[in-house]
Amino acid sequence: MELVAVKEGLARILVPKAERIYDAPVFYNPVMSLNRDISVLAVKVLGPKRVLDALSATGIRGIRYALETPAEEVWLNDISEEAYGLMKKNASLNIDGELYEEGDRSYLWGEKLVVINKGDANRLMAENFRYFDFLDLDPFGSPVEFLDTALRSVRRNGVLAVTATDTGVLCGAYRNACLRKYLAEPIRGPLCHEAGLRILIGTVVRYAAKYDLGVEVLLAYHRDHYFRAFLKLKSGAKKADKSLSQLGFLWADKSGRFEYRRGFLPDKPGASGPLWLGPLKDESFVEELLESARDHPLAHKKTLSFLQLISEELDVPFHYDTHTLARACSLTPPKLDVIIQRLRELGHSATKTHFSPTSVKTDAPFGVVAEVMKNV
Ligand code: SAM
């Protein structure tokens, strides 16, 4: 495989040369450097001792954890032979120390321990019961096939970071796949991304509950073609019950009006879900990420502004798409800033949202938003 060098954060790694990223023998997507930037900041802020990058490909994510955070023990794993070879090469290029090989595993002992493993992630996680303080699942498509073992491999009060790139499934383009993988009814239209993210979190909550684990959302977001969530696992049946009580259902119509209710079952037809109706961020965690981002060698030029947008975003379930509302009332959509300003003047909270550049998050009811739209 022909390799080229790329720089990302503090790492300089070799990646396969390829016309299209999905043709490469080992996967590397530069667009995901924003996802990795935020993950590195999260590890830096949370300070876990043992970190697993369970689906590592080139090793970039785990190598950045080793180079840019205080983590003491970082594991990189991939099932592919070619990825294993490249992870070893990239780890040696970036991290000082002796590489010691034993079967399908290599150890790099330097200032910290880096373990490079070739194998099925489920097997590795099953063999390491309650071992990792921070476990990262960054798969192709859905993470559901790894959730059970991941939840068992994270230590109590540890953090599970999960990516899902099957946006077509979670956003309702492939409804049956969503029913199969997430046991949830997705929704199409302007709320599909937020609902998709909330279905993903809701699924982790249900998986975790059977192990008497509750879930606290540190940060969850949607960007480009993926969803990402940092979830703190809290030990105890009561914590699990509390998390389950934050699940519920969403109803939305073509006019942009929506309603949601917590509950184990939907109380009327036409519901989407079950989905998470709790917060999508822990404000102090996001503030720390933002603070830490200011003097960190970030790889993506949008990481800081994206975190800023998220930190300012009102954390209430769902949002009003002003273009949908305008269409329903036969109006030209007014400027988003003007609508936000007017809602605030009326005493409501209102902000932009990272889910859509044409939407507003507000605690104002639908009728008020519709009136504002008509009168500004
Ligand atoms: N985390 C990487 C990054 O940030 O660049 C990208 C990972 S890529 C999306 C997914 C990787 O998972 C692929 O390299 C693939 O070989 C690996 N993979 C797929 N199934 C696996 C399994 N069951 N166990 C371990 N690795 C697996």
Image: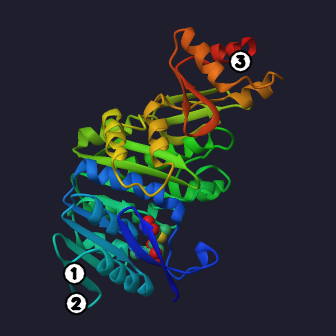
Label 2: few (<14), some or many (≥20) within 10 Å?
A: few
| Left or right of 189 on screen, residue 315 | left
**Label 3 SS:** helix
Q: Quadrant of residue 146?
A: bottom left
Give x and y (percent) for residue 272: 59, 40
Which image quarter: residue 254? top right
Q: Provide the residue designation for mark 1.
A: 107
The furthest residue to the right:
330
**Mark-to-mark CA distance, 2 and 1:** 8 Å
Tell me where residue 365 appears, x and y as whole percent: 59, 17
Q: Residue 102 carries which label?
A: 2
Residue at the image point whose x is 47% and y is 72% from the top: 6
Give percent across and percent down for residue 100.
Answer: 20, 87
Q: Mark 3 points at which residue?
A: 373
User: Which numbered disc flags the more N-terminal residue, 2 or 1?
Assistant: 2
Question: What whole-number distance in Å separates the C-alpha atoms at marks 3 and 2?
Answer: 66 Å
